[in-house]
Amino acid sequence: MNHYSYHSHTADVIMKVRAESLNELFETAMRGTGNLLKNNFCKQTAASSIEKKIVVHSVDLIALLIDFLSEVLLNSHIDKTIYCNLNIVKLTDREIEATISGSSVEYFDEDIKAVTYHEADVFKQKNNQWEASIIFDI
Amino acid sequence: MIDKSQLQKKSDFLWEIPMTTRADMRVPAHVYALPEIIESMSDDRSLQQLVNVTTLPGIQKAAIVMPDIHEGYGFPIGGIAATLYPDGVISPGGIGYDINCGVRLLVSNLEYDDIKDKAEQIAIELYNKIPSGVGKGGEIKLTQEEMDEVLTEGAEWAVRKKMGFAEDLASMESMGRLKDADPNAVSDHAKKRGFDQLGTIGSGNHFVEVSRVDEIFDNLTAERFGIKNNQIVILIHTGSRGLGHQVATDYLKIMLDAMPNYNIKVPDRELACVPFSSAEGQNYYKAMCAAANFAWCNREVITWEIREAWKQLFPNKNELQLLYDVSHNIAKIEEHEIDGKLQKLIVHRKGATRSFGPRHDEIPERFQETGQPVIIPGSMGTASYILAGTSQSMLTTFGSSCHGAGRALSRRASKRQVNVAHLEKELNEKGIYVRAGSRTGVAEEAPEAYKDIDLVIETVHRANIALKVARLRPVSVIKG
């Protein structure tokens, strides 16, 4: 089952993510980021009025997840939008091509300054589940 | 894992992790902290991070951390690293996401008795005048052309637009403008994040605080700084907002991608770096300078907002002079003595304040005898300090000092542990009024979330890297 949870870090927040597949790991991490920006927004909002295409290339899978979330965060800040839905066209260890969609908001509850590479991790468990941990600078 | 058991005591305030501790260390690690701070240090990764910093190509003398040390990203907060110019590395992690986060102090001609009955009204008036809070934009919406002007001119832009005084410029580190800034090195995305954020303080630990001078430690220097007991002063703590965060994010990725081209390997991705002289290094430096200029302009515009509010609050006695504006997240090209010779260095300060001593070319004429003012903000229920830079800091810490109390609790832990209503009542009883965008913001920044600032200040004072001049106590606090 796909799941994310937030945990304490000295000045910030760690998000732990678990998912059945790599595609779902990226989507769950994106929804977790959205729900941190605005409390439970992606859990409550089904409509998606704003759509963006994004392409990200990175040096490896860990960097790809961080760079992807940074790109989503950038779009959130610029568009004042929370992105909750992800349609992946292509996903490899070093590239993602996707459409993100979401809804605009008047304000965020939390100011995520950046998605950091600090202690970032992505790995596949023996039971084939994917897990990731991401630290946000807030 | 490096921990405090590996610290070797050099004096009552200086500890060393020797180069022999790990094979990849290029220099030793120095920790400035009184024994009480070392004892209470948590088992976070800050010392591990400090040792990682010692591995940076071109690093000189030592990786240094101040007593407000805590875990950051790649670099520990409170860290200083100087690399050899021009081929040593520059690392965005050594500057931080909030480029040129810094503090300035405005000196009023009022005393505590003049305002003590107005503390709550001051908080309300300033809160209404200064946009603050999560992602909050301001009244100023910069066009693309104006944004490039701000990134180039820094605080001069605000002065040119009649939102600042020309005499303020002389009271800012680098006169509020880094001349190597190039707006073309800043992505359009970063500019879009910042277009409506000039004149805003943002959220987190950023604030505007009206304080009273509570104790003078050095009468002569205080007099030169124009500081008197019971005087009302105003602290502004903020940085380059979303624009700076995006510059850091953009260039961390660029450097991670580029590092293999320079055969650089680092023990932590957040230490991503390239030679300063490389194309990527130069572009980042120019973008960082531009973001730093945005931050200085931001603090100057906020100063103007405060001066406007002050005129309404105190129609007959509203003078607010800028004492000094210091940066604590920045990289600067400076000259320091290495092995008896003056050497040009790229000095990274991440949660560390410049602390240049007397008779240094970089500091204004009026501080030539005293050393530069070093302004250290505390948490909202405790104290802040005005210190003076020293010549000793030039010899030991690349002319640097601490930057604050340093977090002890995570923001989430603070939210869980702090009862905001109780905290507000406690602060009110002490005569401190807080106006914040959200109650959780108040909980995150509660005094108990921070270390004991008095011990931090005592360390830098005893180490003679910045000397105590005056202590401030908060009266009215505006937070995001």
Image (cartoon, grey):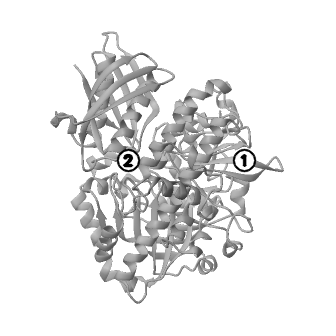
Subunit under mark 2: B
Name the residue nearer the viewer: B258 or B449. Answer: B258
Sequence order check, earlier mark of 1 and 2: 1
Instruction: Provide residue B193's location: percent of width, then percent of height.
Output: 41, 48
Instruction: Provide residue B112's location: percent of width, then percent of height.
Output: 40, 82
Q: Is residue B217 above or below residue B439?
A: below
Q: Which residue is mark 1?
A: B345
The kind of secondary structure element at disc 2 is loop
Subunit under mark 1: B
Q: Is residue B422 above or below residue B184?
A: below
Residue at left offset 46%, top offset 45%: B190
Q: Is residue B379 above or below residue B329?
A: below
Name the residue nearer the viewer: B300 or A117. Answer: B300
Instruction: Provide residue B50's location: percent of width, then percent of height.
Output: 58, 39
Q: Is residue B456 visible?
A: no
Q: Which residue is mark 2?
A: B409
Q: Amino acid at mark 1?
A: Leu
Residue at left offset 38%, top offset 32%: A69
Image quadrant in which the C terminus of chain B is located: bottom left
Q: Amino acid at mark 2?
A: Leu
